[in-house]
Amino acid sequence: MKNGFMHIAILDIKQNIRSKWFWGYSLVFGGFVAVMFALGITESQIIGFVGLSRLMVTFMQVSMAVLPIFVLISTVRSVVGDRESNVMEYMLSLPISLSGYFWGKLVGRFFIIFVPVFLALFGATIWAVITNIDVPWNLFFIYSLQLAAMVICFLGLSMFISTLSRSQEIAISIAFIIWLVAVAFLDLLLMGIMLRSRMDPGLIIGVGMINPLQVFRTGALALFDPELTVMGPASYYILDTVSRTIFVIFSVVYPVTLGVLLAYFGNRYFNRNDVI
């Protein structure tokens, strides 16, 4: 492409593949799946789910804990790091547009972060086929979409922070604070606010659903627990408001929309302000 989008994306992918953190990150998820098979987790049962479904449930819970903070910490340094090291000044001296640079960075980072997670999940299904374990292909497809949606959401947020920040330290601090707030506003804190303030439960739960981490968690839970019993009283309001199918669709569409919007505003700021 004329604006250098593909060149930046390929360059970012090659640069990250050569780094140690990429292989360590890949081994975390690949090793986790291998350990789960070795420990016989596919033979255990939870809420009627057994076999590969049981492993997928555990995999999604681990991904919810690891992926957001990893995406934030590893990506918020992309733009601001290139600015501080003067790499950006050199890159932009080439026939590369600002938008091409920005979106190339984002797409390259998406490939690097999502592919190892997807391959770990896909590798589990291949091993299940080889060992004659039933494969829930519908769960595999939906979980893959949810993982991609979560990565896109936090990538858009990370690129937005990286564009606005003036130093890597500030970018990392903001990312860490946002992650702490997202984790804090899961069920426990929301229930505490509702009990103390006597606010309308619907309002509290609605505010909670602004948190993409909460949406991802609830959407993943809805696939293996149709009644959302593990969420307690909040499940009644959610399931009375929307159907399970609609909420699962929402758990994919909302994070993607939020991530793309944040990336758009980040790119807009990047194009309209002094980037050097």
Image: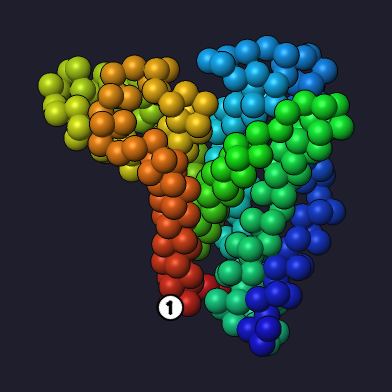
In the foreground, 244 or 274: 244
Three-letter residue code for mark 1: Arg
* Residue 116 rendering spot, x and y as whole percentages: 74, 45
114 above or below 26? below
Instruction: For mark 1, give the secondary structure.
Output: helix
171 above or below 194? below
259 above or below 46? below
239 lies left or right of 91: left
Please name the residue that numbered disc 1 is placed on. 272
Residue placed at 43% from the left, 57% from the top? 257
Q: Quadrant of residue 129?
A: top right
Callout 1: few (<14), some (14-19), or many (20+) C-alpha neighbours within 10 Å?
A: few
Residue placed at 44% from the left, 47% from the top? 249
Question: Which quarter shows the N terminus?
Answer: bottom right
133 lies left or right of 195: right
In the foreground, 173 or 132: 132
Indicate the colouring scheme.
rainbow
Regarding residue 173, the answer to whether it shows in the image is no
63 lies left or right of 52: left
* Residue 196 rendering spot, x and y as whole percentages: 17, 18
Regarding residue 187, the answer to whether it shows in the image is yes
Question: Which quarter shows the C terminus?
Answer: bottom right
Q: Quadrant of residue 106?
A: bottom right
Q: Quadrant of residue 192?
A: top left
Residue placed at 41% from the left, 50% from the top? 254
Residue placed at 38% from the left, 44% from the top? 246
* Residue 61 rendering spot, x and y as whole percentages: 57, 27
* Residue 174 rendering spot, x and y as whole percentages: 46, 45
